[in-house]
Image (tube, grey):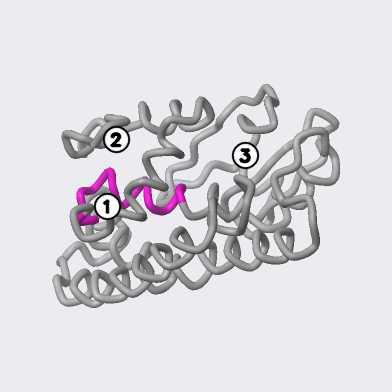
Amino acid sequence: MMSEKRLDYEMVYEVPWKLSDELFEYNFSGTVPVFVDISGTAVYGNSAIREYLEEVYSEINLLGNDLQQRTESRKIADWFNFTFHNDVYYPIIQEKVLKRFSTDINRQPEPALIRRAGGKLACYMDYISWLIDQRNWLAGRDFSIADISAASFISVLDYLGIIQWGKYELVKSWYARIKSRPSFRNILSDNLSQLPPVADYSNLDF
């Protein structure tokens, strides 16, 4: 979102199972993401950060130019940040990533959890397909925070090779457009050294 708004920023990474003391100075609950503005203002949580950026750095609008798209943008972004996260994203990340690296949780994999999340993923992908079939972008005519939120989750699942793109051509075409945006290049070059992405992850034509 900050790249789309053409803002300079520095990314500070937190290890989920070994949080820094500095994080708690900005957010007493110790959760990410946390945004610290140049003024020193600290904002945490996806929804609060996006609203802050829209209010303070409003030159480039990522909500929409009319009430309907602004409503849809917020609704779809929150749908991914909360419902999709809980139903699909977190169970897969727990089994595929966190259990591989963390020493604080039971590392015994539970394939049933991945299968259940994969079944729910198919329902979400069908809904995204329907949205793209009806609109230019997820929330309407213009690229918005709805697309940013959705793509941030989809990209991680794509990195892990979870998505069978042959089944979802409409979603694939939407995701390809997002991968081609300059703001997405840093995401495509990011990787875990001990868990490399699938071969086509960074390819714009996949």
Tell me the quadrant of the picture where the C terminus can be found.
top left
N-terminal label among 2 and 1: 1
**Element type at marker 2?**
loop
Q: Which mark is residue 192?
A: 2
Q: Position of residue 83 (x, y in %)?
A: 49, 73
Tell me the quadrant of the picture where the N terminus can be found.
top right
Residue denoted by label 1: 97
Q: Nearer the viewer, mark 1 or mark 3?
A: 3
85 displayed left or right of 68: left
Residues drawn in magenta: 151-164
Residue denoted by label 3: 1
Q: CA distance from mark 2 to mark 1?
A: 10 Å
Please give the name of the residue rendered at 23% of the width and 67% of the height, measured from the top-left corner.
106
| 154 is within the stretch colored magenta | yes
Q: Are marks 2 and 1 in contact (CB under 8 Å)?
A: yes
Which amino acid is tagged 3? Met
**Element type at marker 1?**
helix
15 displayed left or right of 192: right
Mark 3, other Cα within 10 Å: few <14 / some 14–19 / many ≥20: some
Q: Nearer the viewer, mark 3 or mark 2?
A: 3
**Element type at marker 3?**
loop
Please give the name of the residue rendered at 82% of the width and 40% of the height, measured from the top-left corner.
41
Q: Are marks 1 and 3 in contact (CB under 8 Å)?
A: no
Q: Position of residue 165 (x, y in %)?
A: 23, 52
Q: Quadrant of residue 127?
A: bottom left
150 displayed left or right of 102: right
Relative to 180, does residue 166 appear above or below in the rendering? below
Q: For the view shown, which residue lies furthest in the front direction?
A: 134
